[in-house]
Amino acid sequence: MKILVCISHVPDTTSKINFTENNTKFDSNGVQFVINPYDEFALTRAMWFKEKQGATVTVVNVGNVSTEPTLRKALAIGADDAIRVNAEATDGFAVAKELAEVVKNGNYNLILAGKESIDYNGGMVPGMLATLLDFNFVNACVGLEIEGEIAAISREIDGGKENLSGNLPLIIAGQKGLVEEKDLRIPNMRGIMMARKKPLSVVEPTTSELATSSTSFEKPAAKSACKIVDNVDELVSLLHNEAKVI
Amino acid sequence: MSVLVFTETSEGKFKKSAFEVTSYGKKVAEQLGTNVVVLAINSSENEVLYKYGAEKVLNVSNNSLDTFNAKVYANVIKQAVEKENAQVVIIDSNTSGLYLAPIAAANLNAGYASNVIALPSSTSPFIVKRKAFSSKAFNNCEISTAIKVIGLAKNSYGIIENEVTGSIEDFSPSLIESNLTSTSIEHTTGTVTIADADIVVSGGRGLKGPENWGMIEELASILGAATACSKPVSDLGWRPHSEHVGQTGKPVASNLYIAIGISGAIQHLAGINSSKVKVVINTDAEAPFFKAADYGIVGDAFEVVPKLIEKLKEFKANNA
Ligand SMILES: Cc1cc2nc3c(=O)[nH]c(=O)nc-3n(C[C@H](O)[C@H](O)[C@H](O)COP(=O)(O)OP(=O)(O)OC[C@H]3O[C@@H](n4cnc5c(N)ncnc54)[C@H](O)[C@@H]3O)c2cc1C
Ligand SMILES: Nc1ncnc2c1ncn2[C@@H]1O[C@H](COP(=O)(O)O)[C@@H](O)[C@H]1O
């Protein structure tokens, strides 16, 4: 099995979100970037397949040079090699097109991604990639087992889950459940040392076409202060008469 | 030219979101000076959509579409787009909508904006406002392709009545093969799901242990609400993972969110920013949740919640 894990490079979950250049650019000043949390589940699952079933694991990111530390971290967790497509990731469709080239060139047959990037919350790259490649695709994946060419996959649905079966090649957009949170891998010292010597290749993008672009950002309007109420009678009355939600 | 709206049904009935996407689609069509066409798969109540502005309903009845398959559904959307010469496609953000929208967009060579919360601010260029950074900010996004796909965030536009005289047209798309087979569906039965709920009652580590969730469930059942929890609560195994709300859990876009014994960490708040009214019950007046909430009671959950249950029972009895 040749596994490709798609890694999105995002602000840490505690980051304060600010914008610069007249609210047209994300302000990365003082922001720490991490592997997208959903992609950590995908990467950890990939490591399991590598160790138990002898798969190779490549990690890929479409981004500029600033994302390399994030790819190195994925190598330190245990991926064999990394690819960076040297393009600014601003449009999900363009990212999917670049990833499709990487998949074709590397003949990967299992592509693990996250269900969304926590920065732009697009939830679009994996589904678009699968469609460009005509691979089987399962969104919001919470379980994946593979025997030979056949995959047993679970996806989250409202109020439960659906179990599916299908052949490789396959793309999944994963989340918690793919592995347990307590089993998520973090880099150890030896991994970090080894990661320095692992190959990280940079390839140039093949398309410059953008389907979408960001014109500006806004922050939510400041909220009015919380009304502190003394007793439940008052609360119920406010929820009924003022907020009109009960 | 037209605006195509995809609606979701469950056992022949429209999901509530179907009315919201139809209301929204009607307005977008007005902005573009064109008509709205609503695609309904295996619905037994198409006429109800007229009330929200559906001028034309494309009615697809086919037993093979009873089980949702994203690839097959996305292809049906593609055929409808071609038939109706649609330039904008609107899809809801239910689990199925989120799954099929990117597939439909790639099939149509269309730019896709998800989590959209308002009408286009301009149609040429075509710009929509969407949630980003886990609702910590909004992003104005221009879609520049000929066909545009919009994923409408739940509860963001609202259900707006706009009665029209509509018509129903039968549509029989050809169905493509999918190589994925659904083998079984497991339901966690009997509860309102977070995705569908108008009200969500959520508990945090302040509730001390799983044995104390009886009052949370009782409160939820009086309100017809779904139950939810903070991340540590599901990590500790007090509640199922499917209830974990927040930046790395489920997003909540309910009308009312009641947080009990939850501190209000930034990652938790990121998941509930889209809820309209937030109530917090916490012993610590300094808990960050009070900065994010609309109403708060500083008090011990073990005293406040039972009183609230009694009061709501009384309220329900008087307002029944
Ligand atoms: C990468 C990352 C992702 C994360 N993602 C999420 C996420 O998606 N969702 C999420 O929820 N968290 C997430 N977290 C965790 C988050 O940072 C907080 O740790 C968590 O939300 C705290 O949960 P809590 O409020 O239940 O517990 P605590 O922080 O322990 O707060 C308990 C609260 O209960 C109050 N309390 C105590 N006793 C009572 C009583 N008797 N009556 C009333 N109130 C009482 C206390 O005053 C306190 O405010 C994430 C963290 C990281 C690092
Ligand atoms: N720039 C990128 N490079 C590599 N993978 C990406 C990139 N953007 C998104 N992905 C993958 O696609 C998933 C969904 O991202 P998104 O569609 O941006 O919400 C992420 O969890 C990643 O696995």
Image (tube, rainbow, N blue to C red):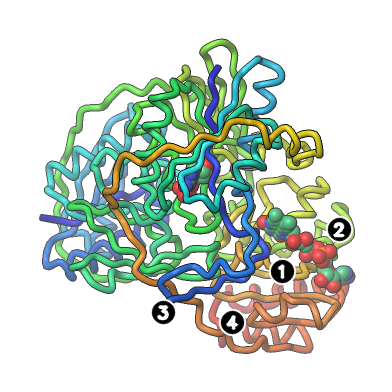
Discs 2, 1 touching: Cβ within 8 Å: no
Q: Are marks 2 and 4 on the same chain?
A: no
Same chain for mark 3 and mark 1? The answer is no
Using the numbered discs, state the Cα–Cα distance from disc 2 to disc 1 in whole angstroms. 15 Å
Looking at the rendered structure, the kind of residue marked 3 is Asn
Numbered badge on residue A22: 3
| Residue B230 makes an appearance in the image | no
Q: Is residue B15 left or right of residue B293?
A: left
Secondary structure under the numbered disc 2 in the rendered image: helix
Q: In front: mark 2 or mark 4? A: 2
Q: Which mark is residue B259?
A: 1
Q: What is the spatial separation of the Cα atoms under label 3 and label 4, in whole angstroms?
A: 41 Å
Q: CA distance from mark 2 to mark 4?
A: 27 Å
Mark number for residue B212?
2
Say which chain tag 2 marks.
Answer: B
Circle 4: residue type: His
Q: Chain of mark 4?
A: A
Residue A240 tag number: 4
Report how far apart the C-alphas of labels 2 and 3 lie in the structure. Answer: 49 Å
The quarter of the image holding the C terminus of chain A is bottom right
Q: Is mark 1 within 8 Å of ligand 1?
A: no
Which callout, 2 or 3, points to the residue nearer the camera?
3
Badge 1: few (under 14), some or many (20 or more) residues near its Cα, within 10 Å? many
